[in-house]
Image (tube, rainbow, N blue to C red):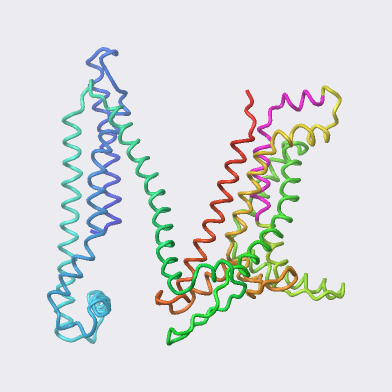
Amino acid sequence: MNSTMLAIILLAVTALAYQFGLLRSTRQGRTLAREQVHSRPVYHAAWLAICCGTPGLLVLLLWSALEPLLIRNWLLASWPELLGGPAETAGTILMRRLQELAGGADNATALELAAAQQLGQLQTWAALGKTALVALASAGGLIWAARRMNATFKARHQVERMVRTLLLGCSAVAVLTTLGIVLSMVSEAFNFFSFIRPSEFFFGTKWNPAFSSTGNTHGEYGLLPLLWGTLMVSLIAMLVAIPLGLMTAIYMAEYAPAWFRDMAKPVIEILAGIPTIVYGIFALMAVGPFFAAAGELLGIQVRATSALTAGVVMGLMIIPFVSSLSDDIITRVPQALRDGALGLGATRSECIRQVVLPAALPGIVGAFLLAFSRAIGETMIVVLAAGNSPQLHANPLEAISTVTVSIINQLTGDTDFAGPQSLVAFALGLTLFVITLALNVIALYVVRKYREHYE
């Protein structure tokens, strides 16, 4: 029985355990006075379901993780004569070959057929053992919980403790994942700085990584052209997204009728769900040629792939982000402030400019900073529309390159992570992480320091 089918059966058994616990706790509660019953039947049922499903699920996950490794080691130790090269590479090739033979492939030697037969037997016994252990674990948990369950049992406390543990585990996974990503980038970035001095990387003005088969040529790894290109595209994007997004939010929150708001707000937010690769293709096929044709009419040389093209399309992508956050912040301003301003004789526009926007300004600034950090980390639009020219210039009509584009370029193709040509991607990623983290911290600081508290 495969793991998917076993998981479905385990889920069904857990549901049956829940129903059994619900019926049993209800029957037990009828024999006692109301004040003697500690927990409601639903908590007893949840306790029984958790004790039934959790042990079986843990056994299933642990077995599924260890089974391939154990079978591989057993076969490689049993058939060393089938290994024709380094143990790691040859072992992977051999296991793939034996899987094909076990699935019905032909043209095999006698040794390979014997090894494939043993593989099938091991997989059969592993499936039986997995099913038996999952069944025993679930049955043991169910029996143990059922023996403890009675009308005075504090099931609510037990269930809430388990839920709290689950939430803590989910939070720990998120924190540990972030910590692991940061530590991996830091360690590889230090390896990169063993080849290139930090001063050359952070203050260099030329970007020309050299891929050399001998490893004697490192090239030039100046960060400033990439960092300036990233900031240029992000600033153009914010010049597009901030006015359009903020004006959209003001109209939707203050002027739009309810029927129009209910219809238009989801349509605007659809832009946030479009994949960024679609925006990149749109920039490459439509926006870039349009800017180039407009430049010819005006007598200005505009490249189809440029900072302007990437920035404008990125700004269009960020509009829903700015609009949605700003709209939520503006609508949270108390209506009493609007009524007071209008009662003193202010017009609708004066009320918005002098009362609503100042009250919502900290949240709006925080939304702008979060949108800016989103623009800095964008990849696919700049890959297709920015031109990939790591030059330090201030002309938005020319091609540029960004940090994210360079990360993709350095990790594309055959990489061994032994030289600066590949390790520089981790230094670039760490730099980008620090920049976006700083912007998010500033946004949170601004919101918390200057936000207004209303009753």
Q: Residue at x 68, y 46 (%)?
A: 323
**x, y percentage for residue 166?**
34, 40
Q: Which quarter of the picture shows residue 281?
A: bottom right
Q: Residue at x 15, y 70 (%)?
A: 74
In the figure, is residue 438 to the left or right of 58? right
User: Is residue 310 one of those drawn in magenta?
Assistant: no
**x, y percentage for residue 300?**
83, 74
Q: Which residues are magenta?
A: 318-342
In the figure, is residue 62 to the left or right of 226? left
Q: Which quarter of the picture shows residue 358?
A: top right
- Give the camera-side residue of 198 and 336: 198
Which quadrant of the rendered structure holds the C terminus?
top right
Magenta span main SS = helix
Q: Residue furthest left?
A: 78
**x, y percentage for residue 405?**
57, 69
Q: In the rendered image of this protein, does residue 307 appear above or below residue 273?
A: below
Q: Residue at x 74, y 75 (%)?
A: 303
Which quadrant of the rendered structure holds the N terminus?
bottom left
Marker count (numbered): 0
Q: Residue at x 19, y 60 (%)?
A: 127
- Give the camera-side residue of 96 and 29: 96
User: Is residue 333 one of those drawn in magenta?
Assistant: yes
**x, y percentage for residue 292?**
78, 74
In the figure, is residue 431 to the left or right of 117? right
